[in-house]
């Protein structure tokens, strides 16, 4: 099992992180990556940047708990979660999730599960910067509903 | 105990953290929010809509009825918007 969890201010290369997952491995048959990118608009209005505030010690612990849960639910060979904080401009990567497994279903499900939980349970808060000033982004009901579909659901494990 | 505030809760209070020892009659997270709201206008503004504020005790999410006895660090923040 290859686990990587990083919270960082600096930009990173998603391709390098994905390559690192499979380097030297021949047991991995499926790699799913999700990359969250900063858009240039929020609710239809242009933005100059996002600033992500976070609760460092809890964010690390909370992400680690959810990675552990993903590993218990699906037969994974590796998980990478990298989440940035600080000021991020449109076009820059905010978050990366990489999941690796022997087959695709586990990798897809685990990546989706981790993103749904990152959106609603990881202690990060986005503030948008516009010409008019700054505003806190409000939580979306769709994100909460997406996370709730995993609670109590049986693991979607692919049969060998 | 150590109290931490994030995002607009932090902005409304004008501080990110502080040490406070609430009276022993304050037993739960919800009661702690009520007690904080009564301290002054800033706290009243920050905690005026306590239902939307989330809390964590020692870095784990908790509900308003969670007991605070023995807590080292309690954080208050709006719903999360990461990812």
Image (cartoon, coloured by chain):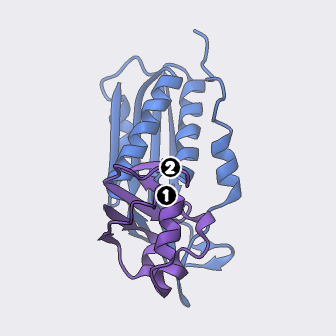
Chain colours: A blue, B purple
Relative to A157, residue A140 above or below: below
Name the residue located 36 percent from the left edge and 37 percent from the top edge. Answer: A19
Residue sitting at 46 percent across and 43 percent down? Answer: A97
Q: Secondary structure at mark 2?
A: loop
What's the residue at 43%, 80% (across, down)? B13
Residues packed near mark 2 inside 10 Å, few (<14), some (14 to 19) or many (20 plus): some
Q: Residue furthest bottom?
A: A132
Pointer 2 and pointer 1 on the same chain: yes
Please tell me which residue lies in front, A5 or A10.
A5
Q: Chain of mark 2?
A: B
The image quadrant that residue A109 belongs to is top right
Label 1 CA crowd tier, 10 Å (few <14, some 14–19, many 20+): many
Residue A146 spot, x, y in % from top left: 67, 45
Above or below B16: residue A101: above
Asked whether, in this view, residue A76 is left or right of residue B64, the answer is left
* Residue ID for mark 1: B29
The quadrant in which residue A160 appears is top right
Q: Secondary structure at mark 1?
A: helix
- The residue lying furthest to the front in this view is B25
Comparing A137 with A96, the one in front is A137
Residue A122 on image: x %, y %: 47, 52
Tell me, for residue B66, which label it has, or none. Answer: 2
Q: CA distance from mark 2 to mark 1?
A: 6 Å
Name above or below for residue A132 compared with residue A98.
below
Quadrant location of the N terminus of chain B? bottom left
Res. A90 visible in picture: no
Tell me if residue A32 can be seen: yes
Marks 2 & 1, CB-CB < 8 Å contact? yes
């Amino acid at each position: 099992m290859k686990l990587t969890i990083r919270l960082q201010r600096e930009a990173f290369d998603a391709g390098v992180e994905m390559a690192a997952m499979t380097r030297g491995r021949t047991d991995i048959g499926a790699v799913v990556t999700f990359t969250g990118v900063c858009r240039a608009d929020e609710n239809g209005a242009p933005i100059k940047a996002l600033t992500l505030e976070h609760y460092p010690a809890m964010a690390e612990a909370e992400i680690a708990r959810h990675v552990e849960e993903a590993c218990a639910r699906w037969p994974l060979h590796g998980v990478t979660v990298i989440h940035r904080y600080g000021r991020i401009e449109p076009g820059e990567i905010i978050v990366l999730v990489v999941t690796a497994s022997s087959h695709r279903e586990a990798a897809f499900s685990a990546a989706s599960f981790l993103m749904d939980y990152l959106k609603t349970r990881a202690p990060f808060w986005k503030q948008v910067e516009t010409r008019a000033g700054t505003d806190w982004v409000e939580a979306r009901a769709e994100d909460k509903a997406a996370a709730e579909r995993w609670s109590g659901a049986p693991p979607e494990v692919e049969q060998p | 105990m150590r109290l931490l505030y994030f995002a607009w809760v932090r902005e409304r209070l004008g501080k990110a953290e502080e040490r406070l020892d609430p009276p022993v009659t304050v037993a739960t997270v919800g009661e702690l929010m009520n007690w904080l709201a009564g301290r002054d206008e800033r706290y009243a503004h920050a905690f005026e809509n306590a239902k939307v504020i989330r809390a964590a005790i020692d870095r784990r999410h908790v509900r308003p009825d969670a007991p605070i006895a023995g807590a080292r660090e309690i954080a208050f923040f709006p719903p999360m918007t990461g990812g």
